[in-house]
Amino acid sequence: MDKIDRKILALLQEDGRLSITDLAAQVGLSLSPCHRRLRELERSGVIRGYRAVIDAAAVGLTFQALVFVTMRQEDRDTLLGFEAAVAAVPNVVQAQRLFGDPDYLLRIVTADLAAYQELEDDVLATLPGVQRLNSTLVMKQIVDYRPLPG
């Protein structure tokens, strides 16, 4: 990956709808070489996809919580079962397995506190292997969807 590939990535992170013509002009390439580089970045998995960034509050998801999960047991089957179950919960917008205690960090979005409480009681607490949930409520989003550094 050279400077031109990194410039392509930086530009697309800022505007994923940038046309190939505009992209080529901004990185100083003609259309064909720029297109080849873009396709290679996609084929190799560097670019995993394209999507719209939605304002959660604009669609009624005004409540966020960070949930730290401590597992009762950490055998392979329990962890895989937990991870598959978490991946199926639409309100979980980010999930990370951590080293140490706690075992997982989940970022949850819901309409309000009551919806979060229902999700925690009826869904999160019943996931395979969960021993304890510790929630922290998000007061304010400072940085969100920042492009990766070049």
Image (cartoon, rainbow, N blue to C red):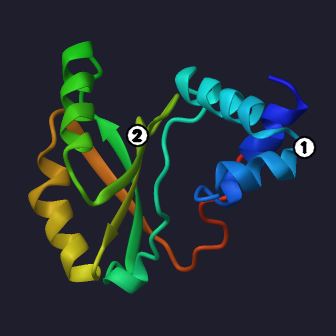
Camera-side mark, 1 or 2: 1
Residue 68 place in picture, x, y as percent? 40, 50
Residue 79 place in picture, x, y as percent? 27, 25
Residue situated in front as seen by the camera: 66 or 45:
45
Q: Quadrant of residue 145?
A: bottom right
Residue 58 place in picture, x, y as percent? 40, 85
> Sequence-wise, which precedes: disc 1 or disc 2?
1
- Circle 1: element type: loop
Q: Where is the C terminus found, in terms of image quarters? A: top right
Q: Is residue 43 left or right of residue 95?
A: right
8, above or below 129, in the image = below
- Circle 2: element type: strand
Distance between the Cα atoms at labels 1 and 2?
A: 44 Å
Residue at 49 percent of width and 33 percent of height: 98
Q: Is residue 33 left or right of residue 65?
A: right
Residue situated in front as seen by the camera: 117 or 144:
144
80, above or below 118, in the image = above
Q: Where is the N terminus found, in terms of image quarters? A: top right
- The residue beneath circle 1 is 28
Labelled disc at residue 104: 2
46, above or below 75, in the image = below
Residue at 20 percent of width and 72 percent of height: 117
Q: Is residue 123 left or right of residue 83?
A: left
Residue situated in front as seen by the camera: 12 or 105:
12
- Residue 83 visible in this rendered orientation of the protein: yes
Residue situated in front as seen by the camera: 7 or 139:
7
Q: Amino acid at mark 2?
A: Tyr
Q: Residues within 10 Å of mark 2 (few under 14, many from 20)?
A: some
Residue at 27 percent of width and 33 percent of height: 83
Residue at 35 percent of width and 44 percent of height: 69
Q: Residues within 10 Å of mark 1 (few under 14, many from 20)?
A: few
Labelled disc at residue 20: none
